[in-house]
Image (cartoon, rainbow, N blue to C red):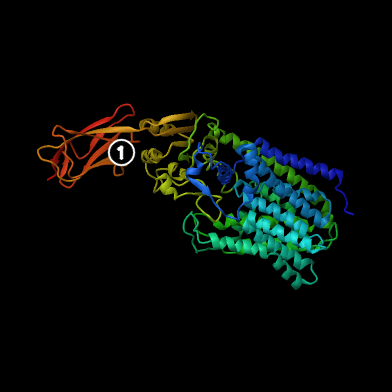
């Protein structure tokens, strides 16, 4: 008969679970890099048919069957609680799956112990702050599958359950399913007396997962990554730098704290080389420990740093290392350090949860002004352009928690942004009905702040006035701009171009372009033009870029007293009018200046005269 859970340990686990929940209670909008994409896709998938929000005009359901982890939980919770509470509950359950999954695995290997609590120290890892929610959930589920797999399997039903578990993980995150398969192979090798037979059985159990992944590759594998062409070039990053990356991308904490949180893992690794342990070593634990060390070694020595603006291998590192870090302590600490290991595991968990709570409160306080307009009575159903104008950092590498802040406005007020993850059928649950360029027109990359917030003394950085002009040009084809943080210069430029402010909340601005009209009086002169005449409107800054135009055919008959023409569009303030014709020009000059306002058109006169 299985030994019951000790009451004291049960109290500790419940207290830690409450502490984990508190992280998401005090931070209802979890600060993460890519997280807003997943929350937005989940909520929009539930409301595609709501015409008042406009999602269905731009998006259609996708079908990736290999990255469904977040949506498995989020879709019903979003429907039940709404996007804010629904996403918070979803992330809590994902984190809890890691914490309790580790406890389940640790118990399977070594019985009841305070060391089981160590999973809480990595329950909110770096991958969560990066927004890799599918991977984090797959990590938690993998720990549960491993915890079941290391127990004696008395019948084919239990083997079938393991096979089903791997298949479920492949739906959550396909890369994690591959890592789980390797971990199961390590367990099989370390526990089986008939290794070849049992490895063959394991391979047979994995056939449904292989079939699932193969079908996904056949259906979606020919779609290129929308971030740009992939490069085959690699270089070798120094091992010490890789070790730093490993620490940075494991625990969701700065390096000095992450090193402390990983101390129990180090003790677990030491147990592989020590004979005396607190409890008789479980052979499956040694197999998992060997797997973990092998995975970390592969990360440290593989030349997989791809030169795509950063060391992309770092982003894949947690997929290889986090599961290894979690299973290492299950090997069991050296006997003399067993008590220290247990207490340290609990201490690490408490410290990690306190840090996650305080970090979330701090980031939410800093990002509070960016979310100040979520409750504003604004309703949209068309394209919207949220732009972060200045970078806001977190004390975690690569994490920019404000980068995708605008997605939450799509959920609260409606509309669609070109920055949604909806271009890659391999991984995106929603897809744009057409290319973003066709749907939205010209717009900057999602990290536009790198161009807007540059220093003019840096080569390639355009003058501030030019950068601000581009901002108002991008806004021409969108229902509104959502800008944060907006400086005085940004406000002045929007005012100069007569943008209407829908919300002015300190550093947060929501504004839309208004139509203005330029009235052109075209006087034919002494003789008819007898050729096409094209009047082009541009701005006084970036004057070589045509904003709009009006073209008259060659057989157009102009009133001898002057033909009244109009160019109407979202271009207010100082503009220039040019005549493009083979044989004609305006007697008043090659460039005619006007300053249209929403309530008052700009007037120019062009008396046609031969250009020669």
Q: Residue at x 64, y 48 (%)?
A: 72
Please state the horizontal and vertical placement of residue 227, each as a whole percent of the image: 49, 54
Screen quadrant of the N terminus: bottom right
Q: Position of residue 158 (x, y in %)?
A: 78, 60
Can residue 96 be seen? Answer: yes
Front-lying residue, 359 or 23: 23
Question: Residue 201: image x %, image y %?
Answer: 73, 68
Task: State the quadrant of the C terminus.
Answer: top left
* Residue in front for this viewpoint, 63 or 390: 63
Residue extending farthest left = 526
Q: Is residue 136 above or below residue 385?
A: below
Question: Which residue corresponds to mark 1?
Answer: 539
| Residue at figure coordinates x 85%, y 43% from the top left | 8
Q: Label 1's element?
A: strand
Q: How many marks?
A: 1
Tell me if 1 is positioned left or right of 55 in this view.
right
Residue 359 visible from this viewpoint: no
Question: From the viewer's perspective, is residue 301 above or below residue 94?
Answer: below
Q: Residue 601 at what x, y percent from top left?
A: 28, 29
**Looking at the rendering, which quadrant does residue 542 occupy?**
top left
Specify whether 154 is left or right of 396. Answer: right
Q: Residues within 10 Å of mark 1 (few under 14, many from 20)?
A: many
Q: Compared to 405, does 68 lie above or below?
A: below
Specify the farthest residue to the right: 1
Q: Is residue 243 left or right of residue 336?
A: left
The residue sitting at 60% across, 55% down in the picture is 65
Q: In the image as oriented, which residue stretches furthest toward the top?
A: 599
């Amino acid at each position: 008969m299985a030994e019951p859970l000790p009451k004291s340990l049960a109290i500790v686990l419940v207290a830690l679970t409450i502490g984990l929940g508190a992280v998401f209670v005090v931070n209802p909008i979890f600060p993460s890099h890519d997280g807003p994409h997943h929350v937005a896709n989940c909520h929009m998938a539930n409301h595609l048919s709501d015409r008042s929000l406009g999602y269905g005009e731009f998006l259609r359901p996708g079908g990736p069957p290999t990255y469904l982890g977040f949506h498995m939980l989020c879709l019903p919770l979003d429907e039940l609680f709404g996007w804010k509470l629904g996403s918070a509950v979803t992330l809590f359950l994902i984190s809890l799956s890691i914490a309790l999954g580790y406890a389940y695995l640790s118990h399977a290997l070594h019985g009841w112990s305070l060391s089981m609590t160590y999973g809480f120290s990595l329950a909110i890892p770096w991958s969560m702050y990066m927004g890799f929610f599918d991977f984090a959930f797959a990590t938690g589920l993998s720990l549960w599958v491993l915890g079941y797999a290391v127990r004696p399997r008395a019948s084919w039903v239990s083997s079938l359950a393991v096979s089903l578990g791997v298949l479920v993980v492949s739906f959550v995150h396909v890369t994690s399913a591959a890592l789980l398969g390797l971990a199961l192979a390590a367990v099989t090798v370390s526990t089986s007396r008939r290794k070849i037979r049992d490895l063959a059985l394991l391979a047979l159990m994995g056939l449904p997962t292989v079939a699932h992944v193969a079908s996904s590759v056949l259906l979606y594998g020919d779609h290129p990554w929308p971030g740009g062409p992939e490069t085959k070039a690699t270089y070798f990053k120094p091992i010490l730098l890789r070790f730093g990356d490993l620490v940075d991308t494991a625990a969701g904490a700065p390096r000095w704290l992450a090193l402390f949180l990983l101390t129990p893992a180090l003790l677990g690794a030491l147990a592989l080389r020590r004979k005396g342990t607190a409890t008789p070593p479980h052979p499956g634990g040694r197999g998992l420990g060997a797997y973990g060390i092998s995975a970390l070694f592969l990360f440290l020595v593989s030349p997989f740093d791809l030169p795509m603006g950063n060391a992309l291998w770092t982003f894949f590192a947690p997929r290889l290392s986090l599961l290894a870090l979690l299973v290492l302590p299950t090997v069991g600490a050296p006997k003399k350090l067993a008590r220290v290991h247990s207490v340290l595991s609990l201490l690490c968990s408490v410290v990690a949860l306190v840090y996650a709570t305080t970090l979330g409160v701090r980031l939410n306080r800093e990002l509070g002004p960016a979310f100040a307009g979520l409750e504003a009575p604004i309703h949209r159903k068309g394209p919207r352009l949220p732009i972060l104008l200045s970078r806001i950092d977190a004390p975690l590498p690569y994490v920019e928690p404000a980068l995708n802040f605008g997605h939450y406005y799509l959920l609260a007020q409606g509309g669609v942004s070109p920055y949604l993850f909806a271009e890659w059928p391999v991984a995106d649950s929603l897809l744009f009905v057409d290319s973003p360029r066709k749907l939205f027109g010209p717009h900057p990359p999602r990290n536009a702040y790198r161009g807007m917030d540059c220093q003019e003394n840096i080569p390639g950085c355009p003058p501030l006035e030019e950068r601000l002009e581009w901002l108002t040009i991008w806004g021409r084809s969108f229902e509104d701009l959502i800008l944060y943080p907006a400086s005085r210069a940004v406000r002045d430029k929007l005012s100069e171009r007569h943008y209407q402010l829908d919300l002015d909340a300190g550093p947060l601005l929501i504004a839309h372009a208004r139509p203005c009209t330029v009235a052109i009086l075209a006087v034919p002169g002494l003789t008819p033009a007898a050729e096409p005449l094209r009047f082009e409107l541009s701005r006084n800054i970036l004057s070589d870029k045509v904003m709009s135009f009006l073209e008259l055919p060659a057989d157009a008959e102009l009133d001898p007293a002057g033909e009244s023409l109009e160019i109407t569009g979202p271009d207010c303030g100082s503009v220039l009018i040019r005549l493009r014709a083979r044989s004609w020009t305006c007697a008043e000059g090659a460039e005619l200046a006007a300053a249209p306002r929403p309530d008052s058109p700009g007037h120019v006169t062009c008396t046609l005269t031969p250009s020669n």
